């Protein structure tokens, strides 16, 4: 198909660039500009302050920015409206329970509070801001003025994550019209599975100071709304952890995209080596016992090259044009994902990368097929991190439809065969590190940020022309990541 003539208009807003060891900038392009004339409104934090997370209030356009020791509320043109300090404070990461609950013999030092999660609770008009101090406690802040509504810390359930890195926690809110909402929390556990579940569902009470805030949705002596990594797993892979890259809800399910280490035997070898596998995890929203936990490996391949290390993901709709090409409906969910080449080095990913599309319905169909076969008694649970991975599936006579949420058997469950995405763009030198997509005038548009600080409009996903912008100074390029942007293309 020949490309139609287009005039392009960029409305770049809410672009977050994270710089390590230097000040961090938030930039926005305020008006349509020619390719040679691009000026950006900028917001610069404190010199030693890193920006970690960003959310935009879809009703007002206000921007909430999670930084080290501070939460900002910005206007849509990046003017500071309110700030809220979250640290530093006296702490030691080895104190568990935290020293604010129990005396700790470890030496306390002045410790920064790294923002690890930032979510807008629209129903209760508040911001959930979770940090690294005291094993990961959260503040609930009023959206208007960042006034602290609550900060639960009296129970062990109030400590969500002991990992200090900003990318270690992902949360998804499930909202109800006449009930308290739920918060699904997924986190790396940093070798502390006895303290922290890797995934759990928590209560979001209307009262921010209620005793039940962040309590497990269900918890008794035997069953709880959580998944814990067995301690025995760490004897096989000492540095085992599940790293959560992205999370979202769709239909009756909550999904998380993860990176997980596994020990595999290369072809022709008798020894095992550690690799990383990208997996999608799915849970039913209403499953209080987490019997619906299923994970399926995902990856991408192009011209014989495998891309298996997940870098970023974003949920969007297909739109009429791309939907027609893929044979799906315009309102079907698509996952836009970025993978780097190979699967061996999580922290040192290769620069070769690929943008790939997954049709969510196809992933769900693969999961349904796996559930049906397991409940026919075929195969094993096949979950690499579960000690009982060789336990055979149990047979049960029941109908498994698209919304099946599991029983107290055959769970948690793994899918062995990888679901492959559709490659739409590859980059050999400047690794893609972030992605966003949305539908505009029936066209599905995708954009990526790269390791060197470039912003690219991807060819092949719409009729808009390819666009590339260089964002930021040389000192920022190696660590910049794209968090949120809007872009529009308009035809003649």
Image: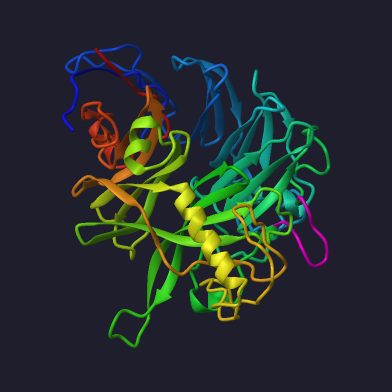
Nearest to the observer: residue 254 or residue 198: 254
Quadrant containing the N terminus is: top left
At 67% from the left edge and 48% from the top edge, which residue is drawn?
A: 285
Quadrant housing residue 116 = top right
Q: Is residue 252 left or right of residue 451?
A: right
Nearest to the observer: residue 8 or residue 20: 8
Nearest to the observer: residue 416 or residue 241: 416
Nearest to the observer: residue 188 or residue 199: 199
User: At which x and y percent is residue 337?
Assistant: 38, 46
User: At which x and y percent is residue 374?
Assistant: 58, 72
Quadrant housing residue 478 = top left
Q: Is residue 403 left or right of residue 414?
A: right
Figure coloring: rainbow
Q: Is residue 111 visible?
A: no
Magenta segment boundaries in residue numbering: 217-225
User: At which x and y percent is residue 153?
Assistant: 75, 45
Q: Is residue 54 visible?
A: yes
Residue 236 magenta: no
Considering the whole magenta stretch, tell me its main secondary structure. loop
At 47% from the left edge and 34% from the top edge, which residue is drawn?
A: 331
């Amino acid at each position: 198909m020949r490309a139609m003539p287009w005039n392009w208009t960029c409305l770049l807003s809410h672009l977050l660039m994270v710089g390590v060891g230097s000040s961090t900038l938030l930039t926005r392009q305020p008006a349509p500009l020619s390719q040679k004339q691009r000026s950006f409104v900028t917001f610069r934090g404190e010199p030693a302050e890193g920006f970690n997370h960003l959310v935009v209030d879809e009703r007002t356009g206000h921007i909430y920015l999670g930084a080290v020791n501070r939460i900002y509320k910005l206007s849509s043109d990046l003017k500071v409206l309110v700030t809220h300090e979250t640290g530093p404070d006296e702490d030691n990461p080895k104190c568990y329970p935290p020293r604010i609950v129990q005396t700790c013999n470890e030496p306390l030092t002045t410790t920064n509070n790294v923002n690890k999660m930032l979510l807008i609770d629209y129903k209760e008009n508040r911001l959930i801001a979770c940090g690294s101090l005291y094993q990961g406690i959260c503040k609930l802040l009023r959206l208007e003025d960042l006034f602290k509504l609550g900060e639960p810390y009296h129970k062990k359930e109030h400590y969500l994550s002991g990992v200090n890195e900003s990318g270690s926690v992902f949360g998804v809110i499930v909202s109800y019209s006449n009930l308290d909402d739920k918060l699904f929390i997924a986190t790396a556990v940093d070798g502390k599975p006895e303290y922290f579940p890797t995934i759990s569902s928590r209560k979001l009470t209307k009262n921010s100071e209620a005793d039940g805030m962040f309590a497990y949705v269900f918890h008794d002596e035997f069953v709880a709304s959580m998944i814990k990594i067995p301690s025995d797993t760490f004897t096989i892979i000492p540095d085992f952890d599940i790293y959560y890259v992205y999370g979202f809800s769709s239909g009756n399910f909550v999904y998380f995209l993860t990176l997980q280490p596994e020990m595999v035997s290369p072809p022709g070898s008798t020894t095992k080596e550690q690799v990383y596998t990208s997996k999608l995890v799915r849970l039913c929203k209403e499953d209080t016992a987490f019997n619906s936990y299923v994970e399926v490996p995902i990856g991408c391949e192009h011209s014989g090259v495998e891309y298996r290390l997940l870098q970023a993901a974003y949920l969007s709709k297909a739109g009429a044009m791309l939907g027609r090409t893929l044979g799906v409906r315009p309102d079907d969910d698509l996952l836009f994902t970025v993978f780097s080449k190979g699967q061996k080095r999580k922290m040192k990913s290769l620069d070769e990368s690929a943008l790939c599309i997954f049709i969510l319905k196809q992933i769900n169909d693969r999961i349904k097929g796996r559930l049906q076969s397991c409940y026919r008694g075929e195969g094993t649970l096949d979950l690499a991190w579960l000690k009982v991975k060789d336990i055979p599936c149990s047979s049960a006579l029941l109908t498994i439809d698209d919304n099946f949420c599991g029983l107290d058997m055959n769970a948690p469950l793994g899918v062995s065969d990888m679901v492959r995405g559709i490659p739409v763009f590859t980059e050999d030198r400047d690794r893609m590190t972030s992605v966003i997509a949305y539908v505009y005038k029936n066209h599905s548009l995708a954009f990526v940020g790269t390791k060197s600080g470039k912003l690219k409009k991807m060819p092949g996903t719409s009729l808009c022309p390819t666009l590339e912008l260089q964002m930021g100074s040389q000192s920022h390029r190696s660590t910049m990541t794209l968090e949120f942007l809007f872009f529009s293309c308009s035809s003649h």
